[in-house]
Amino acid sequence: MLSAYKVLVLDDHAFQCAHLKDMLEEAGFSHVDTLQSAGDALRGIRDHGYNLVVMDVNMPVMDGAQFIHELARQGLNPMLAIVTGCSRRMANSISLMAKEKGLAVVGAFVKPVSPEQMDRLAAGLLRKRSADPPSAPHPDADHASSLIDRQSLESALRDGSIRAWFQPKKSLSSGNIVGAEALVRWQHRELGLMMPSSFLKALRDYGLDHELLIRMLEDGLKAYRIWRGQGHRIPISINLPASLLDRPQLPDELYYMVTNSGLPAEDVTFELLEDDMAVGAGQYYMGTSRLRLKGFGLSQDDFGKGYSTMYSLISTPFTELKIDRAFVCGAAKDEVRAAALVSSVQLGRQLGLQVTAEGVETMQDLQFVRQIGCDYAQGYLISAALDASAFGRLLADEPNPYFPPCTPPH
């Protein structure tokens, strides 16, 4: 599988290039090239289509931050592994910059890099490749964007081409699946299976957030009833943009849908997405309070990023705190992330909230979040998002060997 990856090592020191190349080849990558200039690397990525770039940050002429900016500006999107001789905070900062510009970061390492780290990088790519759904065809960008107009989005929402897939949430004490988060996917007639990064911005720009919310809830209710028929009670979570709380009747609409389907409101949690806080404070607090009064769970999603402030956490009637993957992924080996993660977990537990760690991708991170007292975990280590049928099969296959029953930490 690793033979399919074309890898470029970018470092201005020839020895470091050769050292990284040797370790990558030992880890199983068979096609590894090296370059010592960021400008040459940009041309190489355009001409040869590298899948992964293992890049130094501190380079002359064009440093790592400028290089990433140029990748994004030129529409080049290889996966990145960040390497730096600077601090861990620098590695984290550069990684976050790359992610905010739409690039996938699969690792961040502080020199000296070890063979074990390259082995983990390789294992993570293999795990991600096996967890991801089959890739769609690769039309050119202009063709793809021309097909994502308002009419096609509305049609896909109506006919179910845009639908919910479900990522399991595991209890860290029992090892059981205790919830399912509905995540949007589009089974496009021409482009194949599309991930949300391909169309979600367009959907929001067209003002179709409400239509998407209803689609996700309908699919979630249907899946819940299917799993219930198989003998499983699996609560569902639905993402809710905070801007929709500007609709005074939204809690009533959602409550009617849920209760009319025969589900208890307590088995539905709405995860607040605060990437758009255009809603007025009064409407926000009215909406969140009414959702809780009707019995729904209420989750602070992506805690630690965006608008998820401490004040919001203590002034909104949340039942769950979901810690953003940026603080979870790699925390077991990153003292800076670990400190932020431990503080967030302690805060959530002191406020009486259920605490979920998102983005758990390695056994080390799994063991760490369990050790520090998280209640639940989500991430690729457990499972990628699945359609309702595949999720049902996953339920039938429990228990998961990654999650032996254990006694919760005291």
Image (cartoon, grey):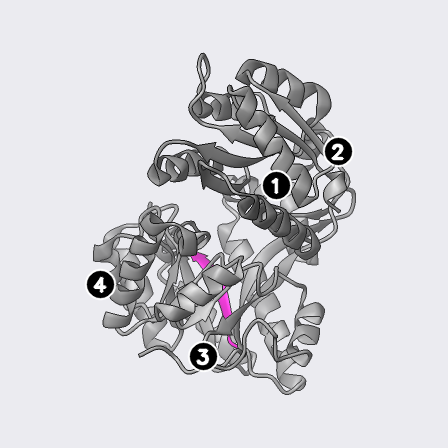
- Asked if the residue at tag 2 contacts the one at tag 1, i.e. Cβ–Cβ closer than 8 Å, the answer is no
Disc 2, SS: loop
- Disc marking residue 69: none
Magenta stretch holds residue 238 = yes
The answer to whether any part of residue 339 appears in the image is yes
Instruction: Tell me the residue that label 3 is attached to.
Output: 173
- Disc marking residue 314: 4
- Quarter of the image for residue 392 reads bottom right
Relative height, residue 274 to residue 95 (above, below): below
The spot of residue 11 in percent (x, y) is: 53, 23
Magenta stretch holds residue 31 = no
What kind of residue is marked 3?
Ser
Look at the image and give the residue range highlighted in magenta: 235-240
Q: Nearer the viewer, mark 3 or mark 2?
A: 3
The spot of residue 333 in percent (x, y) is: 42, 52
In three-dimensional space, the C-alpha distance between marks 3 and 2, rounded to whole angstroms, equals 45 Å
Instruction: Tell me the residue that label 2 is attached to.
Output: 139
Instruction: Tell me the residue that label 1 is attached to.
Output: 198
The spot of residue 135 in percent (x, y) is: 73, 46
In three-dimensional space, the C-alpha distance between marks 2 and 4, rounded to whole angstroms, equals 47 Å
- Quarter of the image for residue 224 reads bottom right
Of 43 and 292, the residue lying toward us: 43
In three-dimensional space, the C-alpha distance between marks 1 and 2, rounded to whole angstroms, equals 12 Å
In three-dimensional space, the C-alpha distance between marks 3 and 1, rounded to whole angstroms, equals 36 Å
Disc 3, SS: loop
In three-dimensional space, the C-alpha distance between marks 1 and 4, rounded to whole angstroms, equals 35 Å
